[in-house]
Image: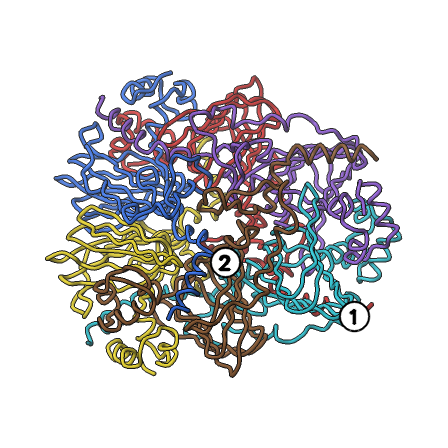
Chain colours: A red, B purple, C blue, D cyan, E brown, F yellow
Amino acid sequence: MLHILFFFLAFVSSSSNAMVNDFCVADLKLSDSPAGYPCVPPAMVTADDFVFSGLGVAGNTTSIINAAVTPAFVAQFPAVNGLGLSLARLDLAKGGVIPIHTHPAASEILLVVHGCITAGFISSSANTVYVKTLKKGDIMIFPQGLLHFQVNSGADGALGFVSFNSPNPGLQITDFALFANNLSSQLVEQTTFLDDATVKRLKAILGGTG
Amino acid sequence: MLHILFFFLAFVSSSSNAMVNDFCVADLKLSDSPAGYPCVPPAMVTADDFVFSGLGVAGNTTSIINAAVTPAFVAQFPAVNGLGLSLARLDLAKGGVIPIHTHPAASEILLVVHGCITAGFISSSANTVYVKTLKKGDIMIFPQGLLHFQVNSGADGALGFVSFNSPNPGLQITDFALFANNLSSQLVEQTTFLDDATVKRLKAILGGTG
Amino acid sequence: MLHILFFFLAFVSSSSNAMVNDFCVADLKLSDSPAGYPCVPPAMVTADDFVFSGLGVAGNTTSIINAAVTPAFVAQFPAVNGLGLSLARLDLAKGGVIPIHTHPAASEILLVVHGCITAGFISSSANTVYVKTLKKGDIMIFPQGLLHFQVNSGADGALGFVSFNSPNPGLQITDFALFANNLSSQLVEQTTFLDDATVKRLKAILGGTG
Amino acid sequence: MLHILFFFLAFVSSSSNAMVNDFCVADLKLSDSPAGYPCVPPAMVTADDFVFSGLGVAGNTTSIINAAVTPAFVAQFPAVNGLGLSLARLDLAKGGVIPIHTHPAASEILLVVHGCITAGFISSSANTVYVKTLKKGDIMIFPQGLLHFQVNSGADGALGFVSFNSPNPGLQITDFALFANNLSSQLVEQTTFLDDATVKRLKAILGGTG
Amino acid sequence: MLHILFFFLAFVSSSSNAMVNDFCVADLKLSDSPAGYPCVPPAMVTADDFVFSGLGVAGNTTSIINAAVTPAFVAQFPAVNGLGLSLARLDLAKGGVIPIHTHPAASEILLVVHGCITAGFISSSANTVYVKTLKKGDIMIFPQGLLHFQVNSGADGALGFVSFNSPNPGLQITDFALFANNLSSQLVEQTTFLDDATVKRLKAILGGTG
Amino acid sequence: MLHILFFFLAFVSSSSNAMVNDFCVADLKLSDSPAGYPCVPPAMVTADDFVFSGLGVAGNTTSIINAAVTPAFVAQFPAVNGLGLSLARLDLAKGGVIPIHTHPAASEILLVVHGCITAGFISSSANTVYVKTLKKGDIMIFPQGLLHFQVNSGADGALGFVSFNSPNPGLQITDFALFANNLSSQLVEQTTFLDDATVKRLKAILGGTG
């Protein structure tokens, strides 16, 4: 009976460095890399690292978008590092809107858990619009990198969860990219065909300068 | 004003064949390939293709596992083809169990929408066990290819949704791989250390022969 | 002397089907797939397939953007299929602008061959702006999926070439995604914070409806 | 004659940091990452790093499986780091068995160098069994992540070598994942349909608790 | 007892199209693609498809290289399609040589099964040489795309097997690329610094023209 | 107005570690990895990091090849790290030649900006030659890992730029791999069929020994 134990303990120890490859919980204190963060030593990893409870709490929707996005990306949930997957929670109060945006590095599936959400995306080059109104239990896929949005089209609040095929999909909200920074109004106007008043108005709302 | 339209229509048409790359809705009637199915021509694709409602209906849990798995993989939801993502619904009645299994080609995140689920996975080689009891709103990640399970540990039914970083993650339930086919009892016994009575009993339950 | 010929002819023929993997010139008449188009049979491929002369001709810049993009993507240059690379030519007349846009599936390097181009991109989430004015011989990289633009900031015309790490990077010009289709004005306004007059004006300019 | 030397020395030095990308011998003292270990500086690498002699020695088969697996994975052979390939040696004494197992992150090809081996794998979902008896010189492929086994079906010992398309394929032996750790007997029984006596017996044999 | 069968038969059939993703045996009659060949329908696949016996037979070494390469690439062994792995057999008679060559799309591990082989590769840019003499049981790794060679340095014949992390690694023997085709002698001389007599001599030996 | 700012500042900060994934400017002082270099902290990155001016200057063509290659790979242009793309400049004086070579890890597209260049590549196994003479504005693609060359076939100098789908494509010039190092003349002769005088002559020219 002991032989097999000896054999396997020997085997396991001889390749124990390799075991970390089952997972690679991010050590966020070290430098990121193109493939993600270095791994916490497996001996320091516990079951708690693989569970995240932050999506169980509704986000604060008291903003002009009446909505909140709560991410469980690698920065919040280090266990997804290197595993090619992450989640986020969408809370949409009545009238809530997730403004038009892209995820530079991931496709997304929206699952509607409560309420009624109108969602859509636009294809590249052909600029074809794909819009649907979703009810509880419906899922919709948004292909990688394409502009898309979600709007609460119901009478009450709505709740959704979005899955991404990246531990760190990124989020680029078009209005914030254009109006919430110091990109000069002249460049914004030249590259969007928007007039100066509109650009200035949105920079004022969203905290931009220039 | 027309110039720009001419310009862009010209541009769009000149590269219209490329536009299909925004997405590739599977044409399940054609042969699969290592990268997935060939694409339905984009002109035939509508918004309906990107939405799937099959996860809005509870699966039938009247089985000895008191549970059901309802997939939204490429075979059920062709729009996920090539987009690296899919979902499934887990219904667990009281006492429901998703038996120990693997997904050969994907990592998984479980989201608990209702009830209480005890879930775990085992690392390779070190055989370390990571088990947690999850409540509504918790998420847990299961690294690619590792044995894992989910058990309803609450007093009532439980509902979860699982995300995968593959349009077709596969599902290999260990008991079904060993006992629900014609793999000879002798080979099962040699390769599992199970005794003949146990193998014969489980083959009888799960429909296996040999 | 003949032995080696026999040996190698034998070897080559025995694995000749595999040779197509050196390259896979797209057969655009067949269905696309997530990995690209099926290959033209290698016996039908000639040196001409690997050369494209379409970038030697200036694009027509007589449009309101005073600029033209001439792609050498898989639709125009089928030899790039499966090889992870493509090019495009940018012609910018005096005052020319490539409006703010993304490439959903590729990073880009701009090479300035003539004139003076001011280019920039915005990071996701942090919304940080990276803008530089480039002279002849300068190169600038635009990370995958991020909003970016190019503006002729010189007194004369400018010429650039852009490289992409995809045979089919896609092109999503934000204004065309929002205003050159039938996406309802109401949804555009809800998801961009733009006012109705602005949306209607741009839809009129860019050929949109709704 | 010197010009070309000057030219190339200049060229080489200007891009010398890039040379490490030809290979990346693992520095096992540093943290692993999702893409593998950091590289030993190329100046410290010698030809010896690219050769491993550990597979030239038979493994110790005096165990209840009468077999041994000797890996040349990244932990034993750091030069495979980042190169997408590794090997292992299988020694099967008379009656030897490699118990049913998976490799979470790689496909495998078995080459029979001596003796007679009966090997098989089971497909996912369909649970189809693919079993063959192999003689010297035969090769068999086992697709990524699927349960498979090898049994010595000859009168004498058998020797095989297995190749993997990963520097660190992992090894999850089903019996060890279930019975060689502290996974509670109750959870094992719930998720495998095995009875308590069987679970307790195998935990005793394989060193498990709980 | 029947419930679970109904449940699982239902489940399996509902996602049966997806099962092909466990493997994708190449249908060599259809067009190749950047990801490999389309799949033979899984219902037509048998265990025989996953086994290849062609490497059990010594190659014909009666050529001026006194060596033979017997491939088990996708063209010979269609089951490797999409699985990222292939093998080949090297027979080296006394004095046998595998001339300097590259595999454009794969790394390689050589396993010496019999005899004594001197093997080496050269790094890019730095042009560093890594040469070792290998005995039975030794393995050596050759990084992707780098020039390498194998020479029988023993008194008798040698036998090796090489593994590749591609189903179709390609083989470009430098001498055959330069001298066994119609590449003009002038271009060969300009791009190799070889003199006309040498080029003409090797073209005559290897069957080249021009 | 402030709510949305609070909301987004909160969101941004909560996921700020993830933002580095938009780009990963190489920290060349740290160890490389199979996926590239660790990232400079994003807070230390400026627009200057994304621009490289080194390709604006002609390389020194006063060598026996009358040509120069000026790379903008990760070692020279750290911003390409992890972004899958790089560039290089080719200066060819009258009679200039880029000797036959490979890039182990990338496909290449050549753009002719000035003059006339004859370029070609050879397929693997079939050894088919694909040669074309290119004029200003033409582009030609060279598939990954295959031997190729460029020769100035015009009356004056020529200028080209080459794009690669890797931040670090490598460069292995066949003559330098064979003759510019200490690879023994005997091994070169055995593996190339070149005679001793030729090998000795080229080692003398290119600085090799042995």
The quadrant where residue D206 appears: bottom right
Residue E153 in picture, x, y percent from top left: 48, 80
Residue annotated with mark 1: A3
For the point 72% across and 44% down, which residue is it?
A: B173
- In this view, the residue in front, F199 or A2, is F199
Q: Secondary structure at mark 2?
A: loop
For the point 67% across and 33% down, which residue is it?
A: E13
Q: Which quadrant, please, contains the C terminus of chain C?
A: top left
- In this view, the residue in front, C163 or A58, is C163
What's the chain of the residue with tag 1? Answer: A
Q: Which mark is residue A30?
A: 2
Residue A56 in picture, x, y percent from top left: 63, 36
Q: For this view, does B148 lie left or right of residue F200?
A: right
What's the chain of the residue with tag 2? Answer: A
Tell me if residue A136 comes above or below residue F69 in the rendering: above
- Would residue C5 be visible to someone looking at this image? yes
